[in-house]
Amino acid sequence: MRLGLKLFLGFFLIVGIAAFFVMRVFVGEVKPGVRQAMESTLVDAANVLAVMAAPDLKAGRMADGDFAAQLAAAQRRDPGAMVWRFPKRSIDYRVTVTDARGIVVYDSRGQDVGRDNSRWNDVYRTLRGQYGARSSPEVPGDETRTVMHVAAPVYDPGDGRTLIGVLTLAQPNDSIAPFIAASQRAIVARGAWLIGLSALIGLLMTWWLARGIGGLSRYARAVSAGEPVPPPKPRRDEIGELGQALETMRRKLQGKAYVEQYVQSLTHEMKSPLAAIRGAAELLQEPLPEAERQRFAANIAQQERRLTETIDQLLRLAEVEQHGWLQHRAALDLCALCRQLAEEAGPRLQAARLRLECELPGRAPVQGDTFLLRQALGNLLDNAIAFSPAGATILLRVRRQDAGWEVTLADAGPGVPDYALERVFERFYSLARPDSGQRSSGLGLPFVAEVARLHGGRAWLRNRAEGGAEASLWLPTT
């Protein structure tokens, strides 16, 4: 299982369990909480009604007194209320009044008049000066439909202290069931939203962490495979610190290996010119004809130029390869760059008796490093001049190709042998010039290929059907 999935499942499990238990507590507390609120309301109403019923109870006219008439009129009313999306069309209160012995003398429904209620907890406790209340089935034996009864003492209106009866106010618990169910549904719905939102936050956090860790993982794999890769993007957290530490470690290890590799390569390439210089120097110590002395001196100068060229090219290539990514990027026009190169190469072309033919559109905009591209195109032009016979024409062409621009330099030279086509981009591999038989440092085309890679493009070399070779550099438009 991947780390991102583990993080997400762990976060979701913690939040889900916590939300489940919280919702369970809330849902479990809704029902008793609503009933407690209803009981408090019944206590207030029962005490108010007890005061109103006292004169009729003392006078013995509970059945046909003002209290009974007013209560009957109230129960016939339609409240026409909308309580939390539920209509309220009738009054659910049931009022019973007992005398001081607990015998029912008034029942708003007219059912239990004359019944002894003194054994019921509401009447029993109230007659003894305590708070009396009970919840009992509406129909004996049916526990699914219960009624809450709250009692209040009825005192003699003359002295306000003598207990003359008990008023019990009853309301079915079913009347508040819709509100309880709605509250529970609301809690569950909001809990589901909470879990969903928490899951989304967890997913985003997991994605954010996994993205950072995944980037470091891909970076480490690319480094271990020896692929050029830009350093991890800076971040102000532990992942960013880890990325910087990995980049520092990569630079130190790669720098050491890079120096070792180039020292070996440079040592190998310097052996041949140094041997030629040493041989010529030894011969110059002996008496020689002037012509021979001039030839050996020229050979030393030629080998010195070869060493200087190799070192210069190697330093340029090392600088590009060491970075591994493009350091400077700006908008530039390949056509303008090619025109500048053609103008600068005019004297060399004239000296070699060559003609440069340009096929350039109006503009060829790309994003890149002007300095590196000028050097890369200059290398391609140098090769074309070196391998073209006198009187030939070199073609410099820029054209649109595959969502990018392709720069091609075609010469009319002998072409590239088939065995060398796969190796021309290898470091230090070069072919002899047709006119002098000399070889270059073998670092020009590797430099071109590296510059192309840094710009997200590619470079290749192929033979032309009409003779000669053509080198191409393709760069994306963005």
Image: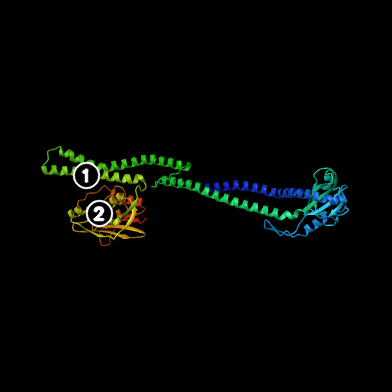
The reply to whether residue 189 is in sight is yes
Residue at the location (18% across, 55% down)?
Answer: 350
In this view, the residue farthest toward the bottom is 466
Q: Is disc 1 placed on a helix, strand or loop?
A: helix
Mark nearest the camera among 2 and 1 is: 2
Foreground residue among 413 and 60: 60
Q: Is residue 353 above or below residue 219?
A: below
- Residue 180 against residue 290 in the figure, above or below: below
Which of 17/219 is in front?
17
Q: Callout 2 environment at 10 Å: few (<14), some (14 to 19), or many (20+)?
A: few
Q: Secondary structure at mark 2?
A: helix
- For disc 1, the neighbor class at 10 Å (few under 14, some 14 to 19, many from 20) is few
Q: Residue at x 67, y 47 (%)?
A: 25
Please, what is the three-letter code of the amino acid marked with disc 2?
Gln
Q: Residue at x 15, y 44 (%)?
A: 295
In the displayed image of the protein, which residue is found farthest to the left? 289
Kindly tell me whether residue 471 is visible in this rendering.
no
Is 224 displayed left or right of 395 in the figure?
Answer: right
Residue 118, given in percent of the width and then of the height, sits at 86, 48
Task: Report the residue marked by disc 1.
Answer: 305
Pointer 2 residue: 340
Q: Quadrant of the C terminus?
A: bottom left
